[in-house]
Image: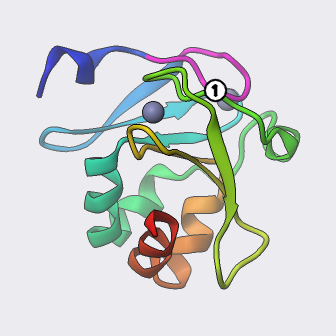
Amino acid sequence: MTEERLQRINCPKCQQMMTQITVDDGIVVDRCSNCGGLFLDVFEKEYLAKAKQRAIDIDLETGRDAGATDEIHVISCPRDQSRMIHIQALENHKVGIETCTICGAVFLDAGELKQLTRKSLLDKLKSVLN
Ligand SMILES: [Zn+2]
Ligand SMILES: [Zn+2]
């Protein structure tokens, strides 16, 4: 992967430095140790849609500020600083996702990846992309 891939980012919600988790060869997901939020670049999102079990493994479901940060809907993409937009998953309206219209990255609050995975993550992410 490129150098950019290795660049560490701050959580767009609580500004803590995110931890990079290696899910598989070349797949590194950023997770916030404070709120448990996950930041997925486009290719990671596609990968996790296929590998549901891994998606479940990396989602802690709880974070210190989980719930509190759920209310924060105005955030900037840590990669390109553009405003991320808040959208709700079609069939599970409790799940709100922040997505970047510039680079296609997605930010998920703690537990949201699991909630989406329980249904069909791939379908949900497709609906997010459209
Ligand atoms: Zn955070
Ligand atoms: Zn972006």
- Measuring from the top left, give residue 29's x and y in whole percent: 37, 38
- Measuring from the top left, give residue 17's x and y in whole percent: 56, 15
Q: Residues within 10 Å of mark 1 (few under 14, many from 20)?
A: many
- The quarter of the image holding the N terminus is top left
Question: Ligand 1: does it lie within 8 Å of the C-beta at label 1?
Answer: yes
- Measuring from the top left, give residue 122's x and y in whole percent: 39, 76
Residue drawn 76% across and 35% down?
A: 74
SS class, disc 1: loop
As for residue 15 lying within the magenta part, the answer is yes
As for residue 129 lying within the magenta part, the answer is no
Front residue of 48 and 82 = 82
* Residue 25 appears in view: yes
Front residue of 68 and 73 = 73
Q: Quadrant of residue 87?
A: bottom right
Q: Residue 80 vs residue 23: left or right?
A: right
The residue segment tinted magenta is 9-17
Q: Which residue is mark 1?
A: 12
